[in-house]
Image (cartoon, grey):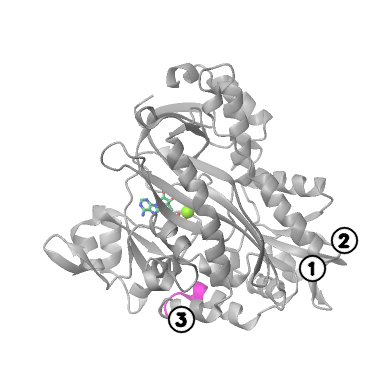
Amino acid sequence: MLENLKSRLAESVDFAALYGLLKAAPGGGLVHAPFALTPCPIDPAASRNLAELSLPFNRLAHAISGQIDFLAEALEEVVGADPFTRDLLEMARNCASTQQLYLQITRSDYFLQARQGLAAPVARQVELNTISASYPALAARVNLLHKHLLSDTPWEDALVANDPLPDIVEGFAQAFRMYGHQDACVVMVVQAGEANVFDQRILEQALHARHIPVVRLTLEAIAEQGSLREGHLTIGGRIAAITYFRAGYTPDDFRSPEAMQGRKLVESSSTIPVPNLATHLAGTKKVQQLLTQPATLRRFCEEHDAALMEACFAGMYSLDEAVAGPGGPLAARKAAAVQPERFVLKPQREGGGNNLYDEEMIARLAALGPGEDRTFVLMERITPIPHDAVMVLEGKASAGKCLSEIGRFGVLLANGKEILLNKDAGYLVRTKHHQVKEGGVSAGYGHLDSLIELPLEEAYRPV
Ligand code: ADP
Ligand code: MG
């Protein structure tokens, strides 16, 4: 397959553009989004297993979002030294809207890790993204590209078809209808100068096709142009039935006081925020770490769901927690200093580029200020199964040993506690060179990819 596809570089770049697999180029103009020319092989059983995890994780995030007291307790020590998380939590506690309609769009990310013998590999969750889960549209476009490239080849039927948008759009459409104002709109909260604009525009186009207008605004623009009218968030005379965040997950989005005002305005109105602040906070690394404690997880789900989810958890620890070290139990921070290759150090941040590894991790751990240690968690480092792939960045191909991170999109619609819709909506694959630690596509490390189901013996053999 690899050899077959290598010769089709120029064609693949043309078709990438044709299918809208694009991003804004740094100096202006357009460039194709990075993609893998060769789809990522996966064992069929592992592929099914990942899809089955979405519904429990959707239910879990929804259940936690109703428990602001749990979130406050979970983040109590983090907020002492992390002003961003503190501000989000404070807003979540103070601006509680009375809106019962709830829409959740998530993406749960995994690596597949080898198991001894020939049994299917195990899924290990990297994180659950509860805000700005990106690439639902471009994931479908790269799948079209692979469908084209593999047509009339022996691998055609093995490609796993992927289009996360219809289920996501259905979630929006049902929530929009239930909000009950037909001339309302969806506000998409965006960053100024967003490079990944086509992923957002394709969703916008799909919503338009369902007669749902979309207004793109930064948080600052919401503060400037928005107002509360009878509880509704109103922009230019139009009610925002849903406010969908593709920004607001990083302190960089809150540099001005107006941005914070915009976020508060959304949360204190009756618009359906996707996500609301509690759901956003349910996706923090600290909460993820606490959920690896069996009793904590079981506060939010039934045993069946808990067992399914626990099977994919990697070890996560607060810095002072005891973990197995070379000569017996050690505080996690000490174990990380002695065996850095076993761990990743994570602050409470989203969007890539924030984690620390190896020497940087050791240096950061040694330099932690008072209380700062509470803002980090240590996570067991996952070693995913490598595969050979060809990746294309700005028209140039490079071949090599790669790692793929697979995300599953989830859509959940609820009215208060009552779940009305809970779906797995398809997948995202991001493939990176095996020596690259971070996986972000926007940051230029990850390449959009598709899955191809091959029997286990073939799936992880160099193709
Ligand atoms: P962010 O919220 O910034 O996306 P993630 O937890 O997803 O943070 O980590 C970013 C990237 O770091 C991931 O895409 C993955 O490539 C890598 N990574 C994260 N956790 C681990 C881990 N436990 N083992 C190995 N790599 C990891
Ligand atoms: Mg991530």
Whole-percent x and y of residue 99?
72, 74
In the drawing, does residue 99 fall left or right of residue 280?
right
Considering the numbered disc 3 on the image, is that residue within a helix, a strand or a loop?
A: helix
Q: Are marks 1 and 2 in contact (CB under 8 Å)?
A: no
Residue 80 falls inside the magenta stretch:
yes
Residue 265: image location, x then y, percent:
71, 74
**In terms of secondary structure, where does tag 1 sit?**
helix
Quadrant of the rendering where the C terminus is positioned: top left
Q: Which residue is mark 2?
A: 182
Q: What's the mark number on residue 73?
A: 3
Disc 1 from disc 2: Cα separation: 21 Å
Judging by the rendered image, the residue that carries numbered circle 1 is 225
Write the start and end of the magenta stretch as one range.
Answer: 79-85
Mark 3 nearby-residue class (10 Å; few <14, some 14–19, many ≥20): few
Cβ of disc 2 within 8 Å of ligand 2? no
The residue carrying mark 3 has its beta carbon less than 8 Å from ligand 1 = no
- Which residue is rendered at x = 54% and y = 32% of the image? 394
How far apart are the two marked residues, 2 and 3, measured between alpha carbons? 40 Å
Foreground: 334 or 195?
A: 334
> Can residue 446 be seen?
no
- Relative placement, left or right, of 83 versus 329 is right
* Residue located 43% across and 57% down the image: 308
The structure residue drawn at horizontal position 28% and vertical position 66%, both measured from the top left corner, is 365
User: Residue sitting at 71 percent across and 43 percent down?
Assistant: 202
Q: CA distance from mark 3 to mark 1?
A: 35 Å
Helix, strand or loop at mark 2:
loop
Label 3 is placed on what type of residue?
Glu
Q: Residues within 10 Å of mark 1 (few under 14, many from 20)?
A: few
